Image (cartoon, grey):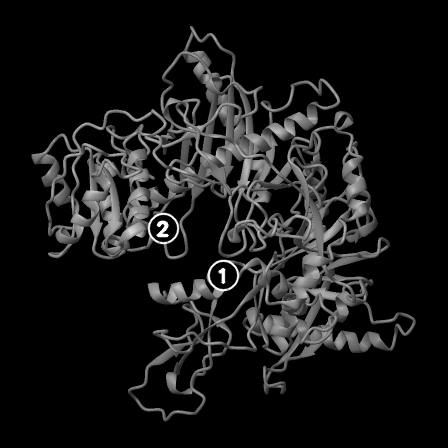
Amino acid sequence: MLDSDSAYYRRRVNVTPDPSKVAEATENSIKPHQAKKTVAKGARRGGKKSVTASPTTSTAEDTENKKKKYPVLLPFRPAYGTEGKEITLWANYVELNLPEDLKLPEDRDNADSQPPAYYSPTGVKHARIINQFLEEYDVKRKGQQQERRDTGCIASDFEALLISTMDFENDLDHSVTYKAETGLEESGSNVYVVELKSTGNNTNPGALEVQKLYEYMKQVTIGEPLDINLAEFTQAFNILLRHYSKSRAIKHGDQVVSGSKAYDVRQRSKLDDFSFSLLYPARAYFSSVCLASARILVNVNLPEKIVDKHAAEYNDHKQRINGNDYVVNVGSDKKPQYYPVGVCIVQPGQTCRIKLSPSETEKMIRCAVMQPMKAISAITKEGFGVIGLGRHSPFGPNPRLDVLQPLTDVDLITVRGRQLNLPGIGYKNNLKGEVTSRRWNLASPKDSGNRKDSGNQKLQYFSPRAIPTMGLLIIKPLADKTTRAAIIEGAETLRQTLKDRGITGMRALTDSQRQCKFIVVVLPNPDKSMYDTIKNVDVKLGIRTACVVAENMMKTGDNMKRYCENVALKINLKMEGACHKLASGSFPPKIKLEETMIIGLDITHPSFGSADTASSIVGMVANVEETFTSWPVAFSLQETATNEFPENIIIYRDGVSEGQYEQVIDFELSHIREACKQIQLATPGLATPPPNITIVIVRKQHHTRFYLTKGSAPPENAQPELQNGNPVAGTVVERGVTSQFTWEFFLQAHHLIQGVARPAHYVVVHDEVFRSQGGFGGPNEGKIAVDNLEKFTHALSYVFNRSTTAIGVCVPARLADLACDRARRYLAAVYDGSSEDEVKLEQIAPHEVIKDVMYYI
C-alpha cells in the first residue's frame, strides 16, 4: 500500500487517468523505415537552447541564415521498446492546451529616460518600468476590445522581449512615469519611454503560428523540414508561463524568481541553530515548457538540492548615524554610492550566498528532501498556485494564461513505462549473487576472480594523538578472515602517526618503505583541504590512498561491519580487484563484448570565484576487459596498445546540454574519426577497419520525475522500502514526455529509499552499433535496436564495484564524473580562487605507477 498522510494523494492513487490517446496515437503511428535522419533543432526541455534576448536587433539576413541551419543530424527513433512489464506512471508534467489558431507576435522592448539621462535603467528598475507599461497598456486596451472576453494576453520576460496574442501598433512608443516600490512617483526626471520594435520583417512578420507547431508535433514521418524553430516556441511559451511569478515578484514581493524557479516567500519557517539567525529556507518550484509528441507540456518540479537561502528583513528601526559607522556600496565598482550602514535596509527575499556550516547544510538538506507522496501533493496543491497554473492560487488568478486555456482541471499527466528484467550478478567460480530489490547479497563471495597480487600493503594513519587507539577498531575487522568482505586478507599493517599533514610525511614513508602501494588515512574530521592535499599523492608519488573519518571508526556491531565492508570494496577496486561481474546473458547477444570499447566522458568547468587561470577539464574512462570491472582514467590521449581497432566504440557523454548536441556531432565525432584516420596512416599493418561509433548523451541535471500509480504499485506484502511511491528500479520511460522523433529514454536503474528518485536521461546523437547500417533489415529490427540499447545501458548500471546496488546513471558516465571531481581536487587552490598559478597537464595526470588503476574511486 502507498502510505501517505494526504487524503488528496490517496484519492489520486486510486483514480488513475489513462495516458493521452492523441499522443499515443502519434507514437504508435511513426514509420521509422520511411524517415530521414533529421529532426528540428531547439530546446524541448528546460529552454537550454533559446533565442538570445539581448536588446540588439538582428538583420533579416541573419535571421534567414539561422533558419537554414536549424536541421541537426540526429538519429531518428527506430521504434519504441517492448521488453519488460508495461506500467502506468504519474509524471510531473501538465498539458498546456493552447488554441491551434493562436499567433504570437514577438516584440523587443527598450526603456529610455526622457529627457535622456546619462544611463538607461537596468535591473530591477527596468523590470518595474516594463511592468508599469503593461499595466497601463492593459487599461488602455480594455475599452477598445469589448468583443473579447479579456484584453488579450501580453507577457514579458521583463528584460527585452514581449509576447502577445494581438498585434501592437507598429513601433509603439509609450511614456511611463516611474513609481518606486512605495507606489509613489519620485521627484525629478522619472519619465521613461518604452519603445516596442517588432522582431519580424516584410517577408517574416515575426509571429509564431501555433498551428504549424502542432502540425510538426503530430507528424508520423519526417519529410522536408518545416520552416519552424522549436527554440523560439519554447522561449515564447516560457515567457507566457513565467510572467505571472515575475510580475508578482516585481509588484508585490510575495515571490522571488531566479531563472526557472519561483519561491514563495510569504511563509518563513526558520531553522534552529543557524549561525546567522536572519536566514530562513524557501521552497522553490521549477517550471519549464517541453514540446513532446503531439502536445505542449509544462514540467513542474520541486528541486531536491539544498533549498536556496533568503535573507530576512534587517534593521526595522532607524539607527543613529555617527562618524564610526561602516559604509555600504549600493552602486557598482565603477560608480560607487556609499551609504552609512545605519540608514540601510536589507530587502527581504534575497538569495543568501554565504557558506553554511556542515550542520547547517545538513539541516537544509533535510528540509529540501521530500518523499514522493508529499512531493506530488506539494506540486499539485501549492506549486501550481505559485507558478500560476491553478485557478484557486493563493496569489490570485493568472489572467494572461487563463485567457488561452481555462485553468479549471489542471492536473499531472500519466505516461506508459516498462519495468526491465534484472541482469544477473556473478562471482568467482561461477557463483551467482542473489539480487533482491535491485541489490544483491555479498555473503561469502570471495570476489570475481580478477584481483591481481597486491604485494606488500601498509595501513597508514594521519591523526591526532588519540587516533591510533581508535584505529585498532578498524584494523581487525578489515584483516579478519571471517569477515564477509575480507578482500585485503594477509596485509601487513604499519601503525604510525605523522604530525605533518602534507606530502612531506607521505614522502618520508615512501623513502623508508619503497614497496608501499596503499595507504589508509584516518582523518580526524571531514576536512576538505586536508583530503585534497592527501589525494595529491596520486600525481606526485603514485600511491593509492583511502581516507576514512575518525567519527566513523567509533561505530559498533553491524554498523561497523557494514562500514568496513564498504571501505574494503573501495580498497579492492584500487588494488585492481573486482567484487562482482555481470553474469552471461546480461548484455545483448548481438554485441561482441570482447571487441567493444565503452567510454565515459565528462567535463568540469570553473565555477564562480575560480581564478582566471582555471581551465575546463575533460575526464575520460574506458573499460580494459569485457567484464567491465576495470576503468582506467585519462585526462589526455594515450597511445594505442595494439595494432587493431575495437569493432565498436560506445561513448556515454556526460556534461552536455540540449543546445550542445550539434557541437558533439560536428566537433567531437569528427575529431574521433580524424584520430582513427591518423592511427591508420601511422600503422601500416593495421588489419581492422575503423570502429563503429555510437554516442549517447547522459543527462542527470533535469527535472523530470515519475511516481507510482495504483496499477504500478508493488503488492501489499512487498518490502516497505519499495512502497514509498518511487517507481521500481529498472523502470524505463520513452513515451508521453519525449518526442516521437528523437531517440531518447529515461531510465531509473536504482531505487531510492529517501526522497524522489531522479531517472537518468539518455539521448542518442549518433549510432552505428545498435542499428544496421543502410536501413532496417526487418519490421522488428528497430524494436530490437531500442531494446538492446536500453538493456545494455541498464546492465552498465550494475557494474559499479564499490556498491552492491545499482546506481542512478550508467557506470561509464558516473566514473567520468568521479574522475573530473578528482582532477578538481588536484587544482583546489585554482578552482577556489586562492591561487592564480597557471594550470598544467602535469598537475592532474596520474603517476606512471597508477595510471592504469582505478585510483580515483
Residue 167 placement (x, y as % from top left):
82, 62
Front disc: 1 or 2: 1
Q: Quadrant of residue 417?
A: top right
In this rendering, the answer to whether 59 lies above or below 300 is above
Q: Residue furthest right?
A: 147
- In the rendered image, residue 478, in percent from the top left (x then y), is placed at 23, 41
- Return the residue nearer the eye: 463 or 327: 463
Q: Which mark is residue 612?
A: 2
The picture quadrant where one finds residue 106 is bottom right
Q: Who's the residue at 50% across and 78% down the image?
A: 348
Task: Give the residue furthest to the left.
Answer: 512
Q: Residue at x 41, y 12 (%)?
A: 682
Left or right: 79 in relation to 600: right
* In the depicted structure, whether residue 10 falls above or below residue 437: below
Residue 456 at x, y percent in the picture:
16, 30
At label 1, the amino acid type is Val
**In the depicted view, which residue is nearer to us: 256 or 434?**
434
Please say if 575 is above or below 150: above
For residue 366, what is the image quadrant? bottom left
Of residues 311 and 231, which is closer to you in this image?
Answer: 311
Image quadrant in which the N terminus is located: bottom right
Secondary structure category for the residue under label 1: loop
Amino acid residing under circle 2: Asp
**Disc 1 + disc 2, Cβ < 8 Å:** no
Kindly state the secondary structure of the residue where label 2 is placed. loop
Q: Nearer the viewer, residue 267 or 114?
A: 267
Report the Cα–Cα distance between label 1 and label 2: 35 Å
Instruction: Give the quadrant of the C terminus.
Output: top left
Rendered location of residue 172, percent (x, y): 76, 67
Q: Earlier in the sequence, mark 1 or mark 2?
A: 1
Number of the label disc, if any, that sits on residue 506: none
Q: Which residue is labeled 1 in the image?
A: 369
